Image (cartoon, helix red, strand yellow):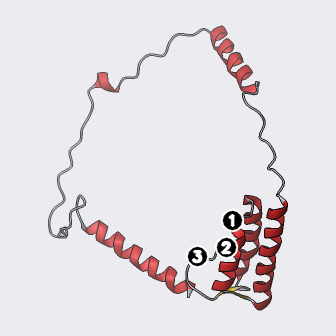
Amino acid sequence: MQLHGWLVGLVLGGLGFVAGTWTRDGATTVVSSSSPPPPLTRVVAPPEARALPAPPSLTADEVRAILREELAQRDTPTSEAPRAPEPPTNEQVAAFDRANEIVDRALVVTTWTENDRARLREQWIHLTPAQLADLSRTVFPRINDGSLTVAFSGPIF
């Protein structure tokens, strides 16, 4: 079932690519293979437009002073260090336990159903990002290795 959807996407993408290469400038007319390509013209900017402005003259001492100043600013903390995430609340812990029970039951029967998805979505809104990532690290590898079969079409979660 998943392979079929992937294959359809690949075929449609390929057809879109082919159609895009046959059209010109976003128009809907197809370019004939017998028509010659438009002539190429080379545009060259005048030399004064291509020249970069001369860098300012700095002495070695000035460069060292600038570097020291930049390094000193880099080493000075400008903001607070990132804080550790807040520990999950009791409600989040309970929701995570219920979500793990749903996933564990699905792993035992080796099938992920629409009912499992619906029940997990009820818990989803109460979970922390770390808990969501943990569930994803449990479910997706099992689906990928075939030990958990998805019994429906659509999003897994």
- Residue 121, numbered circle: 2
Q: Check disc 2 and give the amino acid type.
A: Arg
Q: Residues within 10 Å of mark 3 (few under 14, many from 20)?
A: few
Left or right of 6: which side holds 110? right
Quadrant location of the N terminus in the rendered image = bottom right
Label 1: element kind? loop
> Image height check: is 92 above or below 104?
above
Q: Check disc 1 and give the amino acid type.
A: Ile
Residue that sits furthest to the left in the current view: 35
Q: CA distance from mark 1 to mark 2?
A: 7 Å
Quadrant location of the C terminus in the rendered image = bottom right
Q: CA distance from mark 1 to mark 3?
A: 16 Å
On the image, the x and y values in percent for residue 25 come to 23, 58
> Image height check: is 127 above or below 4?
above
Look at 58% across and 76% down and name the residue there.
155
On the image, the x and y values in percent for residue 110 come to 74, 89
Look at 79% across and 63% down and name the residue there.
92
Q: Nearer the viewer, residue 107 or 101?
A: 101
Residue position for label 1: 125
Question: Disc 3, disc 2: CB below 8 Å?
Answer: no
